[in-house]
Image (cartoon, rainbow, N blue to C red):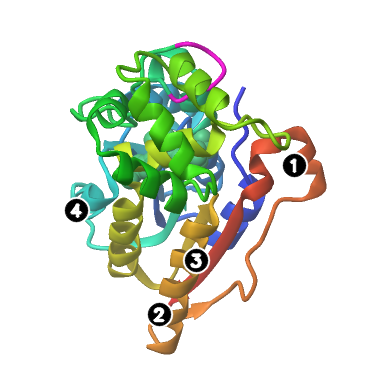
Amino acid sequence: MHFPVLRAEAVEYLAVRPDGVYLDATAGLGGHTLEIASRLTTGFVIANDRDAESLEFARANTMEFAARIRFHHGKFSDLGEAVREQGFEKVNGLLADLGVSRYQLTEPHRGFSILTDGPLDMRMDQTQRMTAADLVNTAAEKAIADWIHQLGEERRARKIARAIVRARPIRSTLHLAGVVERAVPRTGRLHPATRTFMALRMVVNDEPGELDRLLNVAPQLTAAGGRIVIVSFTSFEDRKVKEQFRNLGREGRAEVLTRRPLTPSEKEVHANPPSRSAKLRAVEMK
Ligand SMILES: C[S@@+](CC[C@H](N)C(=O)[O-])C[C@H]1O[C@@H](n2cnc3c(N)ncnc32)[C@H](O)[C@@H]1O
C-alpha cells in the first residue's frame, strides 16, 4: 500500500491540460503519475525516478494508462535529457515529491529502515557505488556529527557521531539503530535514530545537491504558463524551495501561487502519519 502525499492537491496545482506534456520528476510507485495520466487525452507524462526498482512498480501500478506515460531512469540532473528524449525542449508542468517512498523506507533490503534488519545501503539508485555502510564506517567523526546536526536537525549529533565511530565496524541497519539508541535516550515519540538515518540517507543520495540541481533546471524546462509544484518533507528543503520560488517571482520569471505552503489535512495525516511534515509550494512560469 502506498499513499502519495497531497495527491489531489499536487495535481490540482499542476492544472493539467489534457493535451499537455508533464514531467513527474519523482515517480516513485506511480501514485502522482497515475493521477496526472488520468487527466490526459492526447498529452503524456514522463515518469522519472533514479530508482529503477521503484519504476518497475510504477509501471505495474499505472498499467491502465500506459499509452500516456513514458518512463525515464535518472536523477534531477538528467531531467533535461528525459524531456529531450521525447522530442521536446519544455514541458507544461513539473512535479517533484521529494525524499524517499514508503516502499524504499520499509523494504528491509534497501537499508533505509530502523525497524527491520538489512544491509546499511540507503542508495535510491542501486547503480551508485557509495552506500551508507561506507559513510558510517569510514567518514571522520566531525563530518558525521555535522551531517546529523545540519541535515537531521538533531541536537545530540556529537554524542551520536562519537558512539558510531567507537562501534565500528557497523554491519546492519539494526546494529546502527541500536548504537544510536544506546548513545542517546528516547525523548519523544520518535525513535532516537530517526534523524540520524534521515541525515545519512540525505548524504548517501546527495539530496541537498540534487535539490539545488532540480531548482536550477525546473524553470528552464517549464514552458510559459506551466507550473512547477514541489512537495518537501524537511524544513531544510522547504527553505530552499521557498527561496528559489521567491527569487523567480522577484526576477519576474514566475508568479508564486502559494504565499504559505500547503500542508496535508488532519484526515490525511491520520491515515498516513509520515505525511505530517509535507509542504507543497507552486509557481507558474511567465
Ligand atoms: C516521496 S517518493 C515519490 C512518491 C510518488 N510521488 C508516488 O506517488 O508514488 C520520492 C521518490 O523520488 C525519488 N527521488 C528522490 N530524489 C531523486 C532525484 N534526485 N532524482 C530522481 N529521483 C529522485 C526517490 O527514488 C523516490 O522514489
Q: Earlier in the sequence, mark 2 or mark 1?
A: 2
What residue is at 33 percent from the left and 28 percent from the top? 165
Mark 1 C-beta closer than 8 Å to ligand 1:
no
What residue is at 55 percent from the left and 64 percent from the top? 281
Q: Mark 2 against mark 1, which lies toward the viewer?
A: 1
SS category of the residue bearing label 1: helix
Amino acid bearing label 3? Arg
Relative to 92, 106 lies left or right: right
Would you identify the image quadrant in which residue 203 lies? top left
Residue 192 location, x and y as percent? 59, 32
**In whole angstroms, how far apart are the C-alphas of marks 2 and 3?**
14 Å
Q: Which residue is mark 2?
A: 248
Magenta span of residues: 112-117
SS category of the residue bearing label 2: helix
Q: Which residue is mark 3?
A: 239
Q: Mark 3 against mark 4, which lies toward the viewer?
A: 3
**In whole angstroms, how far apart are the C-alphas of marks 2 and 1?**
31 Å
Amino acid bearing label 2? Leu
Cβ–Cβ below 8 Å for labels 1 and 4?
Answer: no
Residue 10 location, x and y as percent? 58, 54
What residue is at 45 percent from the left and 49 percent from the top? 149
Q: Does the magenta run of residues contain 116? A: yes
Amino acid bearing label 4? Arg
Q: Earlier in the sequence, mark 3 or mark 4?
A: 4
User: Label for residue 269?
Assistant: 1
SS category of the residue bearing label 4: helix
Amino acid bearing label 1? Val
Q: Which residue is mark 4?
A: 84
Q: Mark 1 against mark 3, which lies toward the viewer?
A: 3
Prevailing secondary structure of the magenta residues: loop
